[in-house]
Image (cartoon, rainbow, N blue to C red):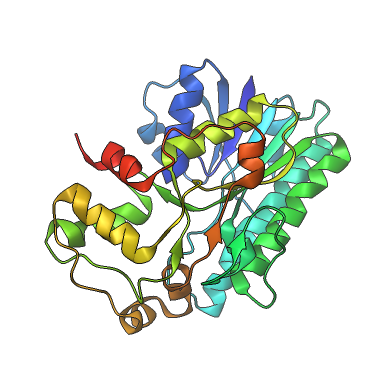
Amino acid sequence: MKIAITGATGFIAKVLVDKLLEANHSLLLLVRNPERARNLYPNKNLEIVSYVANQSGSWQDSLDGCDAVINLAGEPIADRWSNQYKQKILESRQIGTQKIVEAIAKASSKPKILINASAIGYYGSSQNETFDENSGPAEGDFLSQVCQLWEAEAKQASNFGTRVAILRFGIVLGSGGGALARMLPAFEFFAGGPIGTGTQWFSWIHILDLVNLIIFTLDHCEMEGCYNATAPNPVKMFQLCETLAKVLNRPCWLPVPSIAMELLLGEGAQVVLQGQKVLPKRTLDAGFTYNYPDLEQALKQIILP
């Protein structure tokens, strides 16, 4: 299978690329920095194409003849949100996906499937509610609005005969990046603790389960529409920190006050200070099996030698 991947030098894509190459797929990587991609994947048999996510261009022709497109591109959200940066967050997802669909529309041999990333921010935040794929979006919430516009663009690909599957990512746990890369140093230096109140929900997924879910979606033609890419056992923030401390054999005693995160990240602090309890109902109903459904098991696999 020939598979195009955007966001191909990111934390998730690095694991995905290796798994797909092991399965003898032919890969086309759409990247902003081809030199970085070549350094990241030395001696790999793959095609690298330079592109700008939210602009039309000759790169769009490269999707002609691809069997699948996996769209992982998007500006990071765990940063300070100025009005300008919020626009970048939105455009990298909405317009970036629009340009992918534009390329699919133009292709004479169209991809059979578009797997598009989204996020559980779609549901907004809540201390008390439980969300699954049947739950509606939040009103007046920036991240939810981004996800709604992002998903709406991806769904347009179905007008051209391409199957569309949207995976709403939870917090991805893995080595070398993501949330753990930010949390581990404090715990390793005996200064770890919950962020904010500690009572906010933390809906997570092991990176290997996420990559396996992407591949499972590629292989199962009946999968269409939205699926939650979260583990079936979400936890509270204090439970995450206590479990991380246990696995590292470190104390969990120094909370990070909400005000500190707000000073550091501004409005973007809501990503870690607010949460939601999200269950992968449709994902489980589709027959997907998690290798790491429980947090302690997942953290041990990531952290311990």
Q: Is 31 placed above or below 195 here?
A: above
Q: Is residue 56 visible?
A: no
User: In the orientation shown, which residue stands out farthest toward the top?
Assistant: 24
Write the residue at 47% across / 30% down: 17
Most foreground residue, 59 or 69: 69
Write the residue at 21% across / 56% down: 245
Most foreground residue, 17 or 100: 17
- Image coordinates of residue 276 in percent, x first then y, are 53, 64
Write the residue at 70% across / 41% down: 165
- Where on the picture, by quarter, is residue 74? bottom right
What is the quadrant of the C terminus in the image?
A: top left
- Image coordinates of residue 202 in percent, x first then y, are 44, 60
Give the side of residue 237 with respect to residue 46, left or right: left
Most foreground residue, 192 or 8: 192
Give the side of residue 243 with respect to residue 12, left or right: left
What is the quadrant of the N terminus in the image?
A: top right
Q: How many marks?
A: 0
Write the residue at 43% across / 80% down: 266
- Image coordinates of residue 222 in percent, x first then y, are 75, 30
Q: Is 63 placed above or below 131 here?
A: above
Q: Is 193 placed above or below 158 here?
A: below
- Where on the picture, by quarter, is residue 30? top right
Give the side of residue 144 with respect to residue 157, left or right: left
Most foreground residue, 169 or 69: 169
Q: Is residue 172 visible?
A: yes
